[in-house]
Image (cartoon, rainbow, N blue to C red):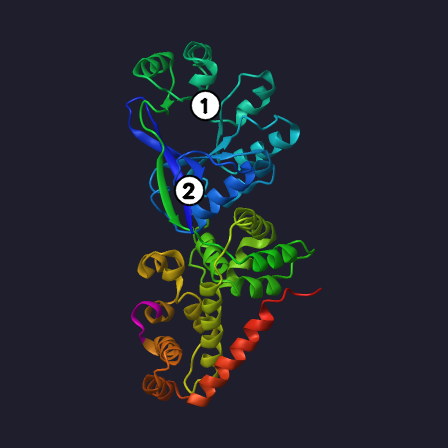
């Protein structure tokens, strides 16, 4: 399955692109689908910021993202790098105390706030000290009314964005009135982009949601659940090592990631991933095979006659099919993950002892008994050990699909 997003450029007074508004799509049809607004926002965040790194949709300039009321009061924008996004407060948001507190908090955290489709209602006045950009809809308000408003407030520190500019005459009028930014079909229609979806298993996500609802959160249990799903593993390591979290040294395992983020950020991470994929059908075969390979690598490392790190072996196994899952070249995906040189070389080059473990799995899966024997000898183990690990892993997989019981 694929993830879709449209982006429409935002230009300055010299008609140079300074950012893009990201618009959620769920198919090739370039129009907003019939989907609940908070679900659309969650999917947009996961599919364009957590899943594939700095892809075309989010590269270079800032991205403007629509946030409905529930997403704002839950502070979901905190998952994103503040220097790369502009938070658009949707016009459907009621200007109540909860929203005011959320906007003020996001402002103090350094985020840029924009009021989308601003309707000039006086109830928004108390928000103004915490707002950077006001977007005025030329179709909704009309060119003259929008321009008059900007002319009356040109001395404020605010920037004004003219959206849905359809003609050159409207652009010239908006620029003369003092607008700073411009968006609309006169400049460009939204451009549709797509990426492969990263979709955690439904059952795993439900188990994780239950765990983060406990007080206090049992981090070892959360770590076990995340490590059981290749997509969650990838998303977590991508997220914690993204531009939003610049650490002195990369974070390369789940335990470090959970400790670094802390309870509140983990709850945000899990909730947005769960909301993004609550209604998406997910193919199981590749996920199960990835988990099977991870478990076998871990157990083979423990039983090897040479010194092998079982945690590193697990990572090599769980990410060994990542290119098939995401339909992207493995070297490009691995650039986004802070894996050790040993794991990196094993996955890309099949070099080193971990490379031998992965080659052993391939040989065993293909009933290539000659190479199975060769890699067993190199790893200091017997073929009987490999067969035992394989059958133990199948039994483990069958039991692991059952949710944890309280």
Looking at the rendering, in which quadrant would you find the C terminus?
Answer: bottom right
Above or below, 79 relative to 226: above
Residue 244 seen in this snapshot: no
Residue on which disc 1 sits: 135
Q: Residue furthest right?
A: 406
Label 1 sits on a secondary structure element that is: strand
* Quarter residue 189 falls in: top left
* Quarter residue 174 falls in: top left
Q: Residue at x 46, y 12 (%)?
A: 149
Query: In the image, is 401 to the left or to the right of 352?
Result: right
Residue 363 in the image: state x and y as whole percent.
36, 79
Residue 208 in the image: state x and y as whole percent.
60, 57
Q: Which residues are magenta?
A: 347-351
Above or below, 213 relative to 351: above
Q: Residue at x 36, y 38 (%)?
A: 192
In the rendered structure, find residue 27 and report the number of the disc placed on it.
Answer: 2
Query: In the image, is 18 to the left or to the right of 122?
Result: left
* Quarter residue 343 falls in: bottom left
Residue 81 in the image: state x and y as whole percent.
45, 43
């Amino acid at each position: 399955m694929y993830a879709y997003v449209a982006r429409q450029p935002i230009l300055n007074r010299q008609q140079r692109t300074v950012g893009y508004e990201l618009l959620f799509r769920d198919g090739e049809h370039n129009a907003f689908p019939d989907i609940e607004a908070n679900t659309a926002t969650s999917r947009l965040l996961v599919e364009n910021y957590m899943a594939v790194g700095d892809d075309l949709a989010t590269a270079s300039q800032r991205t403007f993202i629509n946030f409905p009321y529930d997403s704002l009061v839950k502070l979901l924008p905190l998952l994103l790098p503040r220097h790369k996004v502009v938070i658009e407060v949707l016009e459907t948001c009621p200007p109540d105390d909860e929203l005011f507190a959320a906007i003020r908090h996001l402002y103090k955290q350094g985020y840029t706030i924009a009021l989308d489709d601003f309707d000039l209602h006086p109830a928004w006045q108390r928000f103004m000290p915490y707002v950077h950009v006001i977007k005025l809809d030329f179709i909704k308000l009309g060119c003259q009314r929008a321009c008059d408003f900007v002319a009356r407030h040109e001395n404020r520190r605010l920037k004004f964005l003219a959206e849905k500019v359809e003609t050159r005459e409207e652009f010239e009028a908006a620029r003369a009135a003092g607008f700073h930014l411009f968006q609309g079909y006169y400049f460009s229609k939204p451009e549709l982009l797509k990426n492969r979806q990263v979709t955690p298993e439904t059952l795993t996500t439900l188990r994780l949601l239950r765990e983060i609802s406990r007080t206090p959160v049992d981090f070892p249990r959360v770590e076990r659940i995340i490590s059981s799903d290749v997509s969650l593993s990838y998303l977590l390591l991508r997220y914690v090592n993204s531009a939003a979290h610049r650490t002195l040294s990369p974070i390369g395992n789940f335990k470090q990631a959970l400790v670094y983020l802390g309870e509140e950020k983990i709850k945000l991470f899990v909730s947005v991933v769960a909301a993004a994929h609550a209604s998406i059908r997910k193919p199981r075969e590749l996920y199960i095979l990835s988990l099977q390979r991870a478990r076998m690598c871990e157990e083979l490392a423990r039983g090897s006659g040479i010194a092998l790190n079982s945690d590193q072996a697990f990572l090599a196994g769980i990410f060994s099919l990542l290119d098939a899952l995401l339909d992207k070249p493995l070297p490009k995906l691995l650039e986004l993950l802070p894996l050790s040189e040993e794991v990196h070389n094993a996955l890309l080059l099949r070099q080193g002892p971990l490379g031998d473990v992965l080659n052993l799995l391939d040989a065993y899966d293909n009933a290539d008994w000659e190479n199975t024997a060769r890699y067993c000898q190199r790893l200091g183990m017997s073929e009987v050990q490999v067969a035992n690990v394989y059958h133990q892993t199948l039994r483990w997989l069958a039991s692991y699909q059952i949710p944890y019981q309280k």
